[in-house]
Amino acid sequence: MGRRDYEDDPNAPAANSLVPAASAVVVDSGGRVLLQRRRDNGMWALPGGAMHIGESLPDCAVRETREETGVDIEVVGIVGTYSNPGHVFAYDDGEVRQEFSICFLARPVAGQLTVSEESTDVGWFEPDEIDGLPMIAGVRRRVNDWRAGAMPATR
């Protein structure tokens, strides 16, 4: 399913759903950040997605990261909350989802990099490499918020 992101765009379609979601800035012991290239829009992104009934938001971040990248994580903090009503995701099936996401800080604990049906590539990137990658503004904001917090990923 294809997806198009609109942020503060007067031509964006009106939202018709609101779904809690989680993402994760996963930072390894060398300070590299885990990213995936999304299959639906071709952009680099943090792992994340919609919360399922019966799970917590941190559990959602752990599950989504494992599903999308093959990496198991431990949540160690919160990067921020993101709920801009002007940021919507329009899907091919007609759903237009308003942004509502918590971005967690996490560290890898196991697993191997693996692409999924949602990603075409996954990898670890130095923070300064991220600036040159194609990425939607909302994801870049999360990475920049993490950078501004300078919060370590390991205890």
Image (spheres, rainbow, N blue to C red):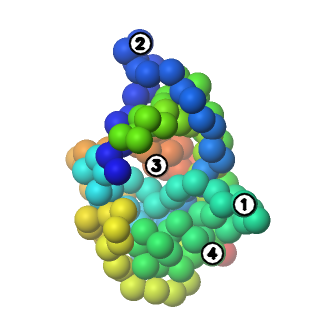
Helix, strand or loop for disc 2? loop
In this view, 98 is above or below 14: below
Mark closer to the observer (2, 1): 1
Image coordinates of residue 142 in percent, x first then y, are 50, 45
| 133 relative position to 99: left or right | left
Name the mark on residue 74: 4
Tag 4 near tag 1, CB within 8 Å: no
Indicate which disc, 4 or 2, sits on the residue closer to the N terminus.
Answer: 2
Name the mark on residue 53: 1
| 10 relative position to 16: left or right | left
Name the mark on residue 143: 3
State how far apart marks 2 and 1 are (Cα).
Answer: 33 Å
For the C terminus, which image quadrant? Answer: bottom right
Q: Residues within 10 Å of mark 1 (few under 14, many from 20)?
A: few
Tag 1 near tag 3, CB within 8 Å: no
Indicate which disc, 3 or 4, sits on the residue closer to the N terminus.
Answer: 4
State how far apart marks 3 and 4 are (Cα).
Answer: 18 Å
Specify the amino acid type for callout 1: Ile
Mark closer to the observer (4, 1): 1
Helix, strand or loop for disc 3? helix
Quick one: 137 or 128, which is closer to the camera?
137
Image coordinates of residue 95 in percent, x first then y, are 48, 37
| 76 relative position to 98: left or right | right
State how far apart marks 4 and 2 are (Cα).
Answer: 39 Å
Residue at the extreme top of the image, as rendered: 10
State how far apart marks 1 and 3 are (Cα).
Answer: 27 Å
